[in-house]
Amino acid sequence: MKFANKTIIITGASRGIGRALAIKLAQEKANLVLAARNEADLNITAQKCLKAGGKPIVVPTDIIDPQACQKLIKASLTAFGAIDCLVNNAGMSMWTRFDEIEDLTLFNKIMQVNYLGAVYCTHYALPHLKKSAGLLVAISSLTGKTGVPTRSGYAASKHALQGFCDSLRIELQDAGVDVLVVSPGFVATEIRQNNVIGGDGKPISTTLNNEQKTAMSVELCADLILKAMQQRKRELVMTLKGKLGLWLKLFAPKLVDAIATKAVSSQKCDR
């Protein structure tokens, strides 16, 4: 897939993976529709994309609102006349054991952002993706394939996203639309400082101990996603450990549980 003059919508484009991927696509001369809630941060992304050679527009969007998602698609068509790719990247996470949860609405919040937001955007974009024989991308997680302690709601939302995309891929196999599910592990993004909630439903900040050794850089993550998009792959599981873990889950599930517990214990969270 070539990206020059192709119209690509990226949700969660204000920071992290979304911003890094937008800049990579701008270097490929893409038309970019940048969506997120924070307009000021979106404008920073747009400036970087413009400097990199892309054609960006900013569309402030709260993806948990179906009407806002519909307006996002309309704005994309008004600006560029077509939609060639939708990247459902916006997301949030959590940090708490299930038996320590005080506010159950955190499950609603996570499911709305990580799953339903992608469903809404996809619903309105799909007729136009069919016209362009385009590409649908979902930024999921390794927790969308195996459970992780302290992430029960997050893992549930990513499992839902995985199942949605797997079903949609089969439905669209004769329509020329490809579906790519990206499953990163730990990536050094701002999500741990801005979009993580605790058991009381309030934001917390999490960091990685010895982050440079345990977390993938956001730039490398974006490079891998870009390559998978170019090849129109169906799955991208990042890191050798991630791939090995999926294989081990078939034969040694208890070992995978132990590995997941150890990985999470290397993190810490602060109020």
Image: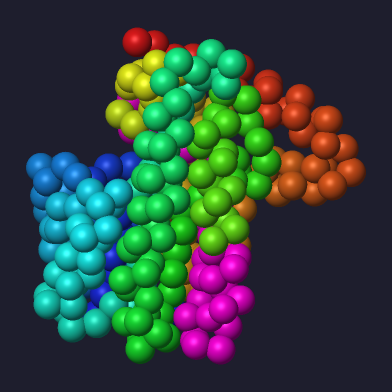
Residue drawn where x is 38% and y is 45% of the image = 112
In the rendered view, would you say 239 is above or below 269? below
Task: Examine the rendering and report whether any part of residue 140 can be seen.
Answer: yes
Residue drawn where x is 33% and y is 78% of the image = 84
Where's residue 218, x and y in %?
40, 43
Seen in the image, is 250 located left or right of residue 31?
A: right
Q: Is residue 167 magenta?
A: yes
Task: Examine the rendering and report whether any part of residue 198 can be seen.
Answer: no
Tell me how many marks there are.
0
In the rendered view, would you say 193 is above or below 4? above
Where's residue 12, x and y in %?
30, 49
Q: Which residue sits furthest top?
A: 271
Examine the image and state in which quarter residue 34 appears.
Answer: bottom left
* Nearer-the-camera pick, 132 or 231: 132
Quarter of the image containing the N terminus?
bottom left
Give the colour scheme shown. Answer: rainbow
Residue drawn where x is 83% and y is 30% of the image = 254
Seen in the image, is 56 located left or right of residue 152?
A: left
Where's residue 155, x and y in %?
57, 39
Quarter of the image containing the C terminus?
top left
Q: Which residues are magenta?
A: 165-193
Seen in the image, is 213 located left or right of residue 218?
A: right
Examine the image and state in which quarter residue 88 appears.
Answer: bottom left
In the rendered view, would you say 1 is above or below 95? below
Residue drawn where x is 44% and y is 43% of the image = 111
Where's residue 232, x and y in %?
52, 74
In the rendered view, would you say 96 is above or below 170? above
Q: Which residue sits furthest right?
A: 251
Q: Is residue 60 magenta?
A: no
